[in-house]
Amino acid sequence: MNHVNFFNQNGIEVSADWVNLRNDQPPINKNLQNIDHFNFDDLAYLTLSALKNSIQGFEIYQLNSNFFEPVLYTGDYIGGVINSNLEMMTNKLCYTVQNKNIFVGIFNFERMAISNLFKQVIQIELSTSIGVVTWIAKRQ
């Protein structure tokens, strides 16, 4: 059985490009969508914490903005790896942390900013952390 089928059959929506190259939409754990509020937070955090313990530079955040709606909303969790090679992040789904606010968007190296689907832009010069999103746990 190939890896994509294995993930999809176990409730994790993932594409072949992500499994093979890590350059497509990050996996989405569909198993977390039908869990009540309390259990969702616990399971999402435990799942992402396990990744943090096994992947160097992995960070976990619960979104506190709707900047990347309608894809991600406040309360969703993301996990990603801190990246110092900003040029390699171009056109990828990335996160940035600024003044305790977590924003997710598409990174543009030339503009040194992330943008959302409505062409709103957040410059990254004030970021305390920036990286590529590799896992998403959606509340909805």
Image (cartoon, grey):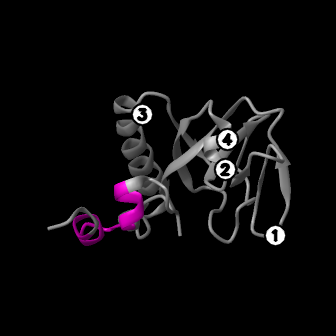
Residue type at mark 3? Lys
Residue 90's mark? 2
Which of pointers 3 and 4 lies earlier in the amino acid sequence?
A: 3
Please report the bounds of the magenta region as a residue range: 5-20
Measure the alpha-carbon separation of dots 2 and 4: 6 Å
**Pointer 3 residue:** 52
- Magenta stretch: residue 42 in it? no
- Magenta stretch: residue 19 in it? yes
Residue beneath the point at 61% across and 55% down: 75
**Pointer 4 residue:** 87
Element marked by disc 4: helix
Residue type at mark 2? Thr
Which of pointers 1 and 3 lies earlier in the amino acid sequence?
A: 3
**Pointer 1 residue:** 118
Circles 2 and 4, Cβ within 8 Å, touching? The answer is: yes
Element marked by disc 1: loop
| Observer-nearest of 109 and 114 | 109
The location of residue 56, given as percent across then percent down, is: 43, 27
